[in-house]
Image: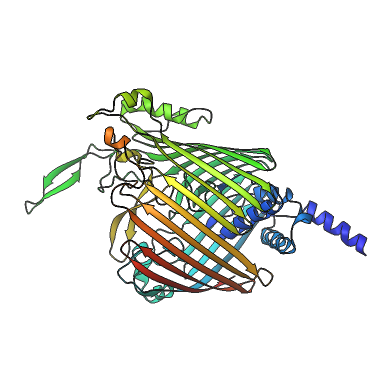
Amino acid sequence: MKKILTIFLTLFILFPVVSEPQKIYSLNRYRELYRVLELLQTEAGISQLSYSYPFTGKEIEGILSRIDYNTLSNNSQILYQEIINQLEIDISGSGFRGNVDGSINAETYLQTNKENDEWIYDYNSRKPVIELDLSAGITNYFWADVALPLQKGLDFNRYTTGAETNISLLWNLDQIDAQFPFTAISSLGGDHWNIQFGRDILNYGVGRSGAFVISDDGSFHDYLKASTFWNNFKYTMTFVNIDPIDVDGLDPYVEYISVEDVDGNPVTVETKESRKKLKIFIDHTFEFKPHPKLSIAINEVTVRGGGEVTLGYLNPLMIMHNLALTDRRYTILGNSLFTFSTIVTPLKNFLVYGEFALDQFETPSESDRIGEEGTGDPNAYGWLAGLTYKGFNIEYIYTNPHLYRSTNSWSIYALTRWYHSVYNDSNDIEIEPLGFKYGPDISLLKISSDMLFFNNKLKVYGEYMYILQGEKRVYDYADSGKEAFEMETPTGSVFSRSIITLQAAYNLYDYLSIYGQINGLFYTDITDFQFIIGASYNF
């Protein structure tokens, strides 16, 4: 009997998953899955090849196949099995198949300082009252998914003060968020390639507190993405659409004139001859695994505005920064970013990682041009480093005052978009992070730990974050000259933040969970305690 059982388990481990190969495991719904995948690989003593999320079902199958199940602890074997069970819900096949699932969520938000409108459990964290997910696959090569949430809009979700609940939307439907769906993806692919088109959230980078290239701190990304992936190599090309809006609320690609209305008041209007042009994020990501314990990633990014995308930007071997230099002749401007990151797993359960981001490199000629009235551009960069041991993590992030900033609104490294408020019947401007959430001029230290109890049914998480923030923001136009070269983080009047987070979640059943969160905010001029209580029913 033992021999038969051993043979059965061996076959099961060698061929562990029958999944939907082209399904995109969205960060909006499967964030915990990605955390567990990294945990399992680290415990097995291997590094993770890719940190360009989200993954396809085929990529996750490949990751699981490279983990030696027998080297995992009992708890980790349970987590491994839970991932398999999760993937096996999505059964592949030769014909058409569809699936309908969703969730019902009830949450309450309380705070002690009603003057504070910044929530740690913010708009992007809060769950919809109801979400219906519709997905379908055709053969093993195509998959599509759309999630339809019923949730409060940005003007009610982000700026809530005092006490509030998400279910009050049911009797105040004019508070609804009209930006949905936030997940609407089509995916086409094979065993080693995939093309995605649609709307979801992306995150490229090894940082736990944020990503330099593109982060999941925004509401959504409208994107086109193509990738090829193998055991030790992955290449990804990504395009993300950005609304061409400047920080004053005027489209920089549209010509405006000042006229008088019927009452003689000056107003700004668009001329008939004006024409909108494209603003887009373009990224080429190369990820390598030269050794089972070492992974390396190289990214080159440009945020480009003012004209069409030429063929040079589609070339993965081209240096986009150099293309942007000549594009300036046509008033087409770009903001380029280069990043290099590495992950090392020297011992089982132990992970060391780092990333460096370079936005602007000071050349000798620029140094010579500084002077009192100089026009030189200073170095613009950021870096992070961290280590993880089992569920414990410590991370430090530094960004100098010039990272991400541009000399014009056409290439600001941020998600600028119009947001429609149903309640106010208005269109407002939103500026959300494209890369690192806190932008330039930041020094950040984060320490966190999570633990699992009762056969992984109870998860407890704790975090402490300390931030020193200077005066410079991503939407401030770039500085140049002597004063700019002398700037150091943090600049000007320093704003300090200490944030304590405690979370707990318990799975009562496979389909029902309860959770809570407490945040203590200790800022330069604000103290606030925030409490979140919730329950989720999945069907």
* In front of the other: 3 or 307: 3
- Tell me which corner region of the image, top left, top right, bottom left or bottom right, holds residue 150: bottom left
Colour convention of the picture: rainbow
In the picture, which quadrant includes the N terminus?
A: bottom right
In the picture, which quadrant includes the C terminus?
A: bottom right
* In front of the other: 321 or 128: 321
Residue occupying the point 44% across, 65% down? 121
Name of the residue lying farthest toward the left:
264
- Tell me which corner region of the image, top left, top right, bottom left or bottom right, holds residue 90: bottom right
Residue 168 in percent (x, y) is at 40, 75
Residue 470 in percent (x, y) is at 33, 49
Does 275 sit left or right of 467 as displayed?
left
Answer whether residue 392 is visible to the viewer in this image.
Answer: yes
* In front of the other: 218 or 95: 218
- Position of residue 328 relative to residue 468, above or below, is above
Residue 519 in percent (x, y) is at 44, 68
- Position of residue 289 relative to residue 266, above or below, is above
Residue occupying the point 29% across, 25% down? 369
Number of marks in picture:
0
Does 413 sit left or right of 90 as displayed?
left
